[in-house]
Image (cartoon, rainbow, N blue to C red):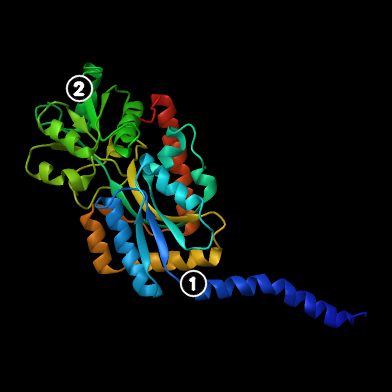
């Protein structure tokens, strides 16, 4: 039977519109069951706390549980791969952070490509690191520190929580851009590294502001500069590295990602709700307690940040010949 042309065109247009209608309906009904938010680190740290804050907010706003699922191991790679291999339906999400972009180059044989295999959903906060030195060191400013390091090559020991951590690569970036040569001393975690710095066994470290601020205030460590492009609200009187080393920037960001091909409408819905949380005074205050400056971006801008971060740290890792432990 031959259909009249007008009826044929109407049916064709209707069929073409069905996928869009289906996507809109899917986003409107999402989530219709519990959502897993994978944290690729052990419970109790800053990453876990951020995940629980945002998960609780999303649970209340979207009326379904956002269940925190800690999957530590492999320097965040085990939990990240869990998300990469999950269905692209918005029901498995990742609490991503700077180590994800570092690992893209640090590990030679990952079973996934972070940039290719994830969908950026929403950024949450950016944490400053701070250059701290033992008070016995004569340098009191970044220029004095650079001059001292150049006069004493390979005599300054720089502690970090381990090879390829944000603290380590931030120090190596400083080496490259300031033209100095500190010796990296890796520890198994940040606690022992800070302990040895306080004891004067090592001379310098790039810890998070929140983990070192009490020692700075007590005069047990001397803060020279924060690593972000702008000054930290926690340490407003401390200059940025970039005020002395043009273009320097290093930080630890946190955000939510999903498997690639997650429907754009679901991504946008999550982004809208997460950005709403970042405008809430109580959430902002709790994130500030973690040393974080709110970072509310669109999915596209968050994806740009991830790509630029991966490129920057890839150059540092290759230049410093950093290997995974």
Q: At 20% across and 27% down in the image, what residue appears?
A: 145
In the visual, does 139 lie left or right of 184?
left
Taking the image as shown, residue 37 lies to the left or right of residue 150, namely: right
Badge 1 crowding class, 10 Å Cα cut-off, few under 14, some 14 to 19, many 20 or more, is many
Indicate the position of residue 47 as horizontal and vertical percent values.
Answer: 30, 52
Looking at the image, which residue is at 42% across and 43% down?
77
Indicate the secondary structure of the residue bearing disc 1.
loop
- Residue situated in front as seen by the camera: 66 or 129: 66
User: Which residue is more in the foreground, 226 or 184?
Assistant: 184
Compared to residue 304, the image places residue 181 above or below, namely: above
Image quadrant containing the N terminus: bottom right
The residue that mark 2 highlights is 148
Instruction: Choose between 304 and 158: the one closer to the eye.
Output: 158
- Give the mark nearest the N terminus, 1 or 2: 1
Please name the residue that numbered disc 1 is placed on: 30
Residue 25 horizontal/vertical position (percent): 57, 75
Name the side, left or right, on which 36 lies relative to 197.
right
Local packing at callout 2 (Cα closer than 10 Å; few below 14, some 14-19, many 20+) is some
């Amino acid at each position: 039977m031959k259909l009249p042309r007008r009826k044929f065109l109407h049916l064709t247009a209707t069929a073409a519109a069905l996928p869009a209608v289906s996507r809109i309906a899917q986003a409107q009904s999402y989530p219709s069951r519990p959502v897993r938010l994978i944290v690729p680190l052990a419970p109790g740290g800053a990453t876990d706390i951020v995940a629980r804050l945002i998960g609780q907010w999303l649970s209340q706003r979207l009326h379904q549980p956002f269940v925190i699922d800690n999957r530590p191991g492999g320097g965040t790679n085990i939990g990240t791969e869990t998300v990469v291999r999950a269905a692209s339906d918005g029901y498995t999400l990742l609490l991503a952070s700077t180590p994800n972009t570092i690992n893209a180059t640090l590990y030679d044989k990952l079973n996934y490509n972070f940039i290719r295999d994830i969908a950026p959903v929403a950024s949450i906060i950016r944490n400053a690191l701070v250059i701290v030195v033992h008070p016995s060191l004569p340098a009191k400013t970044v220029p004095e520190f650079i001059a001292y390091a150049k006069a004493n090559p390979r005599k300054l020991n720089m502690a970090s929580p381990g090879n390829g951590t944000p603290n380590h690569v931030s120090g190596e970036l400083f080496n490259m851009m300031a033209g100095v040569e500190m010796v990296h001393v890796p520890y198994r975690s940040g606690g022992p590294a800070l302990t040895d710095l306080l004891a004067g066994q090592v001379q310098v470290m790039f810890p998070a502001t929140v983990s070192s601020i009490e020692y700075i205030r007590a005069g047990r460590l001397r803060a020279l500069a924060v690593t972000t492009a702008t000054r930290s609200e926690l340490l407003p009187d401390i200059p940025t590295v970039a005020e002395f080393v043009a273009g320097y920037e290093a930080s630890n960001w946190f955000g939510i990602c999903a498997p690639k091909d997650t429907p754009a409408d679901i991504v946008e819905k999550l982004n809208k709700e997460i950005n709403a949380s970042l405008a809430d005074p109580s959430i902002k205050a709790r994130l500030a307690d973690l040393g974080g400056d709110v970072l509310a971006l669109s999915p596209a801008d968050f994806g740009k940040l991830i790509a630029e971060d991966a490129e920057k740290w890839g150059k540092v890792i290759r230049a410093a010949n950093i290997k995974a432990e």
